[in-house]
Image (cartoon, grey):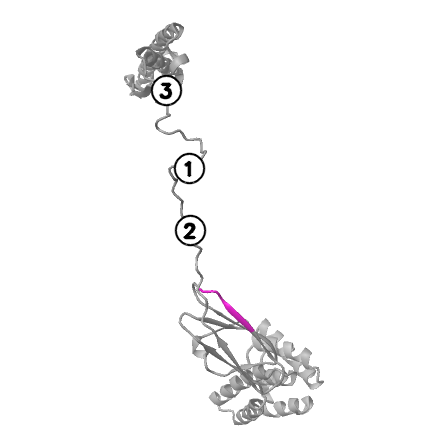
Amino acid sequence: MRSSKGVVFGIAAVSAVASGARPAQADSRSVAEALFRDGTQLLGANRIDEACPKLAESQKLDPALGTLFYLAVCHEQQGLTATAWSEFTSATEWAERTNQPERIAFGRKHLQDLNEKLSTVVLQAESAFGLELRLDDGLLSTAAIGTPLPLDPGRHVIVASAPGHQPWQTTVNVESTGQALSVTIPALTAVTLAPKEKTKPLEADSEPPLSGQISEATQAPAAPHSPTNVLLWTAASVTGASAVLGTVFGIMTFGARDRAISECPGNVCGPGGFDDIDRARSFATVSTVSFSVGLAAAIATGYLWLRGDGVSNHSTSATTSGPSIFVSPSGSQKQASITLTARIP
């Protein structure tokens, strides 16, 4: 292997314009230029492990053909033959597109030397349908199957996966240069779902499960609604609805009265004041009627309760399926009304 200082001088002779012609117009370019100069100095001092990251970052910030050649040389001296081979290939193609004969010759010479040291792996697959391949952190197309893939020395992980199948993984170790490895990916194992447990039917002599359920034969028949019971709950419902309705319309009465007072200063009312007076009277009438109906219903509820035919015997059934009272208030500027709808089972 050539000495690092000689290689640096060789690249400098081929790409003498690489560092001088790079204008530092943006911050990223300025940083890239500084990293490039530092990296080449470290490479010339044979401090390879320090030089390569600086050259790689410079190329990332501001891609340049000269930097790419330096980076390829650095990785070659670091022993990363596959990485250097890829970078020399890209740099040589770049030089061919831009018609730079000296750089083309420089790149081809290094590619020829690397081809003798390059280690490769060939992937084979028993079934490539739906297969997804990964080599280390890179995703591979199934077109890569059967093609020698360059590898740097070291440990590499190969993963194969497919929808509905268990993934497969293996590791290969490249211990020296010039190795030709082969890996066969077996057919992936399909993932099978565990069958659901079937419910075993009860046998004739088996005991029923203790689930707290009562069979139809042992269920007690629902207690019928007696007329007195229905009347009791109806009267109680009317009492509650009337109290709520009387309260609501009472509040509305006071509100309409206050508006009428504000609209009629000195007992002189405009059209709005007369409307408020009419509404206050209508709301007051509904409130009074509601409280009256509620009082009568409360008396009836107390009477039916004292008879003893109400809650004590049929409270459960009356509660769950007893009568229902629906209150529907309505009003306008001239009148107000309520509609009571009762549902009796």
Q: Amino acid at mark 2?
A: Lys
- Image point 44% across, 35% down: which residue? 209
Q: Nearer the viewer, residue 323 or 123?
A: 123
Q: Is residue 211 left or right of residue 331?
A: right
Q: Secondary structure at mark 3?
A: helix
Q: Is residue 267 above or below residue 83?
A: above
Q: Is-magenta flag for residue 189?
A: no
Does residue 112 appear in the picture of this structure? yes
Mark 2 vs mark 3, CA separation in Å? 42 Å
- Between marks 1 and 2 in the image, the one whose residue lies nearer the viewer: 1
Q: Residue 269: give x, y in percent of width and height.
A: 33, 15
Q: Amino acid at mark 3?
A: Ser
Q: Nearer the viewer, residue 330 or 118?
A: 118
Mark 3 vs mark 1, CA separation in Å? 35 Å
Q: Nearer the viewer, residue 145 or 85?
A: 145
Q: Tell me the number on the disc at residue 206.
A: 1
Residue extent of the magenta highlight: 165-170
Judging by the rendered image, the residue that carries numbered circle 2 is 196
Q: Secondary structure at mark 2?
A: loop
Judging by the rendered image, the residue that carries numbered circle 3 is 317
Badge 1 crowding class, 10 Å Cα cut-off, few under 14, some 14 to 19, many 20 or more, is few
Q: Is-magenta flag for residue 166?
A: yes
Q: Nearer the viewer, residue 72 or 156?
A: 156
